[in-house]
Amino acid sequence: MAFACSIPAVPTVQQDDETIRITRWDFEPGAVTGWHEHGWPYFVVMLIAGTLRIHNGNEVVDTPLAQGQAYMRPAGIRHDVMNGSDHPIAFVEIEVKQPSALKELALS
Protein backbone atom coordinates (compact mmCIF):
# COMPACT_ATOMS: atom_id res chain seq x y z
CA MET A 1 0.00 0.00 0.00
CA ALA A 2 1.22 3.47 -0.78
CA PHE A 3 -0.10 7.00 -0.66
CA ALA A 4 -1.81 8.27 -3.80
CA CYS A 5 0.44 11.23 -4.59
CA SER A 6 2.32 12.51 -7.60
CA ILE A 7 4.86 14.61 -5.67
CA PRO A 8 8.07 12.67 -4.96
CA ALA A 9 10.33 13.46 -2.03
CA VAL A 10 13.85 14.30 -3.20
CA PRO A 11 16.69 12.09 -1.89
CA THR A 12 20.28 13.34 -2.00
CA VAL A 13 22.81 10.64 -1.13
CA GLN A 14 25.65 12.20 0.84
CA GLN A 15 27.68 9.05 1.52
CA ASP A 16 27.26 5.44 0.41
CA ASP A 17 29.92 2.85 1.14
CA GLU A 18 30.17 -0.67 2.56
CA THR A 19 29.44 0.54 6.11
CA ILE A 20 26.84 3.29 5.89
CA ARG A 21 24.49 5.23 3.60
CA ILE A 22 23.57 8.81 4.50
CA THR A 23 20.71 10.41 2.58
CA ARG A 24 19.11 13.83 2.94
CA TRP A 25 15.39 13.77 2.13
CA ASP A 26 13.56 16.98 1.13
CA PHE A 27 9.76 17.00 1.03
CA GLU A 28 7.39 19.61 -0.32
CA PRO A 29 3.97 19.54 1.43
CA GLY A 30 2.30 16.25 0.50
CA ALA A 31 5.45 14.74 -1.06
CA VAL A 32 6.10 11.02 -0.51
CA THR A 33 9.05 8.62 -0.53
CA GLY A 34 7.07 5.85 -2.20
CA TRP A 35 6.59 2.36 -0.77
CA HIS A 36 9.93 0.87 0.30
CA GLU A 37 11.62 -1.52 2.73
CA HIS A 38 14.73 -0.83 4.78
CA GLY A 39 17.36 -3.54 4.50
CA TRP A 40 19.42 -2.13 7.37
CA PRO A 41 18.77 -0.49 10.76
CA TYR A 42 18.50 3.26 10.32
CA PHE A 43 18.37 6.59 12.11
CA VAL A 44 16.42 9.70 11.10
CA VAL A 45 17.37 13.21 12.25
CA MET A 46 14.94 16.03 11.48
CA LEU A 47 16.50 19.11 9.88
CA ILE A 48 13.21 21.02 9.69
CA ALA A 49 10.38 20.36 12.16
CA GLY A 50 7.25 18.80 10.74
CA THR A 51 4.86 15.89 10.67
CA LEU A 52 5.81 12.58 9.09
CA ARG A 53 2.68 10.77 7.90
CA ILE A 54 3.66 7.10 7.82
CA HIS A 55 1.66 4.38 6.02
CA ASN A 56 2.73 0.91 7.17
CA GLY A 57 0.37 -1.05 4.91
CA ASN A 58 -2.34 -1.34 7.56
CA GLU A 59 -2.69 2.12 9.04
CA VAL A 60 -1.58 5.73 8.68
CA VAL A 61 0.04 7.46 11.66
CA ASP A 62 0.99 11.13 11.94
CA THR A 63 4.20 11.70 13.90
CA PRO A 64 5.10 15.34 14.68
CA LEU A 65 8.85 15.80 15.14
CA ALA A 66 10.89 18.81 16.27
CA GLN A 67 13.96 20.17 14.51
CA GLY A 68 16.93 18.09 15.67
CA GLN A 69 14.75 15.25 16.98
CA ALA A 70 15.97 11.78 16.04
CA TYR A 71 14.72 8.20 16.12
CA MET A 72 16.00 4.72 15.20
CA ARG A 73 14.21 1.81 13.52
CA PRO A 74 15.33 -1.79 12.87
CA ALA A 75 15.95 -3.39 9.48
CA GLY A 76 12.90 -4.79 7.67
CA ILE A 77 10.61 -1.78 8.08
CA ARG A 78 8.20 -1.43 5.11
CA HIS A 79 6.38 1.87 4.68
CA ASP A 80 5.62 4.99 2.67
CA VAL A 81 6.39 8.37 4.23
CA MET A 82 4.55 11.62 3.41
CA ASN A 83 5.12 15.19 4.55
CA GLY A 84 1.96 15.77 6.58
CA SER A 85 2.93 19.41 7.23
CA ASP A 86 1.77 22.53 5.39
CA HIS A 87 5.41 23.56 4.77
CA PRO A 88 8.52 21.89 3.30
CA ILE A 89 10.43 19.58 5.64
CA ALA A 90 13.75 17.74 5.51
CA PHE A 91 15.55 15.00 7.40
CA VAL A 92 18.78 13.04 7.21
CA GLU A 93 18.48 9.24 7.13
CA ILE A 94 21.49 7.17 8.21
CA GLU A 95 21.33 3.48 7.24
CA VAL A 96 23.85 1.29 9.07
CA LYS A 97 24.98 -1.50 6.72
CA GLN A 98 27.63 -3.01 9.01
CA PRO A 99 27.00 -2.18 12.68
CA SER A 100 30.10 -4.13 13.77
CA ALA A 101 32.33 -1.97 11.54
CA LEU A 102 30.96 1.19 13.21
CA LYS A 103 31.71 -0.30 16.63
CA GLU A 104 35.31 -0.94 15.56
CA LEU A 105 35.64 2.67 14.34
CA ALA A 106 34.32 3.98 17.66
CA LEU A 107 36.87 1.95 19.59
CA SER A 108 39.85 3.09 17.50
Image: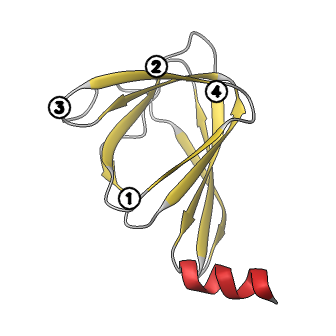
> Outermost residue toward the front?
107
Q: Which residue is mark 3?
A: 58
Q: Which residue is mark 2?
A: 30
Disc 2 to disc 3, C-alpha distance: 20 Å
Q: Which residue is mark 4?
A: 89
Q: Quadrant of the C terminus?
A: bottom right
Kind of residue sitting beneath label 1: His
Helix, strand or loop at mark 3: loop
- The colour scheme used here is secondary structure
Callouts 3 and 4 close, C-beta under 8 Å: no
Kind of residue sitting beneath label 3: Asn
Helix, strand or loop at mark 4: strand
Residue 50 in picture, x, y percent from top left:
61, 21
Quarter of the rendering containing residue 26? top right
Quarter of the rendering containing residue 2? top left
Q: Which residue is mark 1?
A: 38
Helix, strand or loop at mark 1: loop
